[in-house]
Image (cartoon, helix red, strand yellow):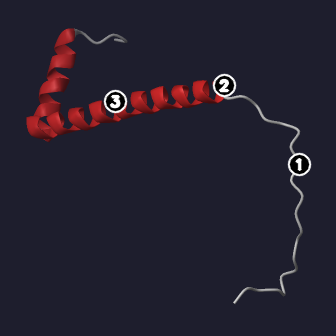
Amino acid sequence: MGSLSIWHWLIVLVIVMLIFGTKKLRNIGTDLGGAVRGFKDGMREGGADKSAEATMPQVSGKTVDGEVKGKSEQKA
């Protein structure tokens, strides 16, 4: 009772095709494939950004002096 045979899955597939239609299922498959492709591209770009950051030299020890003016002074 816990396992479904191939015939059960074929009947489920036929019922799903009757309910949604082949065109809608094809569109869902295309959208899902595009989403997976976009996710993979994003992961690749994220890995490229991290490797670029790792190769850039780290700059430290620089101090910038500045003067803070009050909020009452506004430029016209």
Q: Is residue 64 above or below residue 42?
A: below
The kind of residue on which mark 3 rests is Arg
Q: Residue at x 54, y 26 (%)?
A: 47
Q: CA distance from mark 1 to mark 3?
A: 45 Å
Give the residue number, with chain letter if any, for mark 3. 37
Residue 63, label in figure: 1
The kind of residue on which mark 2 rests is Ala
**In which quadrant of the rendered image does the N terminus lie?**
top left
Residue 54, label in figure: 2
Q: Position of residue 73 (x, y in %)?
A: 82, 86
Q: Residue at x 90, y 58 (%)?
A: 65
Q: CA distance from mark 3 to mark 2?
A: 26 Å
The kind of residue on which mark 1 rests is Thr
Q: Residue at x 72, y 28 (%)?
A: 57
Q: Residue at x 76, y 86 (%)?
A: 74
**SS category of the residue bearing label 1:** loop
